[in-house]
Amino acid sequence: MLSEKHVSTLRPGDIFRDWVVYISDDRISNKRCDVKVYKVEPASHTVCRYEFIGENHSVVAKFYAEPTGWRRDYNPVQSLETEFSNLIKASQIINVPRPIAMRKDFNCVLVTENIPGNTLYEYMNDENELYDKLTAVAQILRRLHDNTKSIYRKQDEFSHFHKVLDQLRLDYSTRKKFNRLLGDWWYSTLVDLPYGCQIHSDANPVNYIFSRGKIYAIDFESSREHASFIHDLGIMAAELKHYFAIHKNNEDKAEPYIGHFLWRYSKSEDEFHRITKTLPFFMAFGLLRMARLGMHDGHNNYVFRKATDCLKAIYLNRKP
């Protein structure tokens, strides 16, 4: 769950404060106003919300040259430019925070409008309202996927999976087991698709915000094209499974919500059944990427066990 902490107040003459006021243009009446700074956590980079005192306006700044998560081996300039471009493209299809400006010399900062509201994660405890919120997420993902169709690069899905396994630094026997399971998926037809699309790629509950009757998707740094639409669905299903297993001590309670989410996404019963057969591959990916966060042993063991079970589901789909 995201939280904010007030860390400072910027006054006229501060170079970054003056630039943020400048790019806010006519949204700021008093150009001499103070600006409160709130640090947003958790996040993969330093992220701050800047509130213009007395102006009823705020923006969010993400500093790509200030990593705070597990990932450090990336090009901050490239990441900055990629997310800016991804937001521009996605904004033509779905609701996303409006990108305002980017600047490399301020630690590769991207400034977007602030979207006040509640994240999907904040509705996870309200099991009745969660159904409606998951319907909205399914609909926004469907719009993104349907309006960005392109050629499909199956090999990229496996490349990303192997990259996550590389980052986990598994022992030889465990890595060999996963390699064998991925090989069985590769040679099946379950991951094959007639077309690819742009995916959000980080379908985490904290990346969907409900504000003034609308749903917004945020954090498009890892968004990519030519991908499988089931990738996003698998990430969300993994997040739901993980949430109910860890926070409710009952992973089975996630099943009705996962089924509802997939049904609301699907256009037909046939598509629903096709998705459910392929979903375990991407759920396994979603679970294993959580293991990069340095969880305690018991938590980590659950993630690896469930990811393995998901990948073994391919054997259930084979005809006798």
Image (cartoon, rainbow, N blue to C red):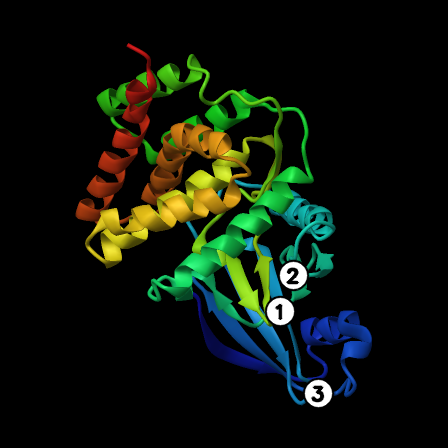
Residue at horizontal 45 percent and vertical 32 percent from the top: 275
Residue type indicated by callout 2: Pro
Residue occupying image coordinates x 42% and y 14%: 188
Mark closer to the chain start, 3 or 2 = 3
Q: Amino acid at mark 3?
A: Cys
Q: Give the label on residue 68, or none.
A: none
Kindly check if marks 1 and 3 are in contact, taking CB atoms under 8 A apart as contact.
no
Distance between mark 1 and mark 3 Cα atoms = 18 Å
- Residue 37, picture quadrant: bottom right
Q: Which mark is residue 33?
A: 3
Asked if residue 175 is positioned above or below residue 47 in the image, the reply reads above
Q: Position of residue 93 (x, y in %)?
A: 70, 49
Q: Is residue 76 above or below residue 231?
A: below
Q: Which residue is mark 1?
A: 114
Residue type beneath disc 1: Asn
Q: CA distance from mark 3 to mark 2?
A: 24 Å
- Find out whether the residues at labels 1 and 2 contact each other: C-beta distance under 8 Å: yes
For label 2, the residue is 97
